[in-house]
Amino acid sequence: MAASKFQALWNHPVGPKTIHFWAPTFKWGLSIANAADFSKPPEELSYPLQFAVACSGLIWSRYCTVITPRNWNLLGVNAAMAGTGVYQLSRKIWHDYSSKTEAEIANE
């Protein structure tokens, strides 16, 4: 039973014998690195970088649902990229917005 499941995975169109398996597997490194930056102070985050990560994740997540064969590993990694990018952008925006309001209050 386990051998047949392994054989089915091995011979799948997006299985380990193809680039369709390995590219998204290594792309997880980007999402993990972005998640590791959750502890980074928001003032050190970059708007262009996080915007690119979020948009890339959103666009490619949509693409993953229309290609054949469906690549769930690619969908997962792109959803994670979109999620981490949007979260980091929200942290940066919130920090910049609250910093400006605190500065305005201090000037009054």
Image (cartoon, grey):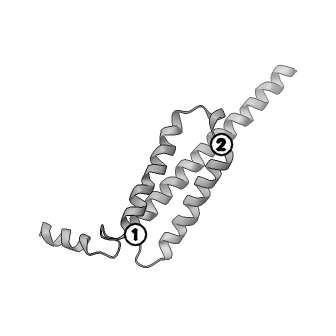
Residue 53 lies left or right of residue 93; in this view the side is left
Task: Find disc 1 in the rendering and name its residue.
Answer: 20
Residue 81 lies left or right of residue 49; in this view the side is left
Q: Secondary structure at mark 1?
A: helix
Which residue is painted at 48% across and 54% down in the image? 80
Answer whether labels 2 and 1 touch (C-beta < 8 Å). Answer: no
Which residue is painted at 55% across and 55% down in the image? 82
Residue 37 percent across, percent down from the top left: 52, 38
Residue 12 percent across, percent down from the top left: 29, 75
Q: Quadrant of the C terminus?
A: top right
Q: Looking at the picture, does residue 49 appear above or below residue 62?
A: above
Residue 98 percent across, percent down from the top left: 72, 32
Query: Which of 105 and 2 lies nearest the eye of the viewer?
Result: 2
Sequence-first tag of 2 and 1: 1
Q: Quadrant of the N terminus?
A: bottom left
| Cα distance between the residues tagged 2 and 1 | 30 Å
Q: Quadrant of residue 59?
A: bottom right
Neighbour tally class for label 1: few under 14, some 14-19, many 20 plus, Cα within 10 Å: some
Q: Secondary structure at mark 2?
A: loop
Q: Quadrant of residue 60?
A: bottom right
Residue 82 lies left or right of residue 103; in this view the side is left
At label 2, which amino acid type do we have? Ser
Q: Residue furthest right?
A: 108
At label 1, which amino acid type do we have? His
Residue 55 percent across, percent down from the top left: 61, 58
Give residue 46's mark: 2
Which residue is painted at 52% across and 54% down in the image? 81
Neighbour tally class for label 2: few under 14, some 14-19, many 20 plus, Cα within 10 Å: few
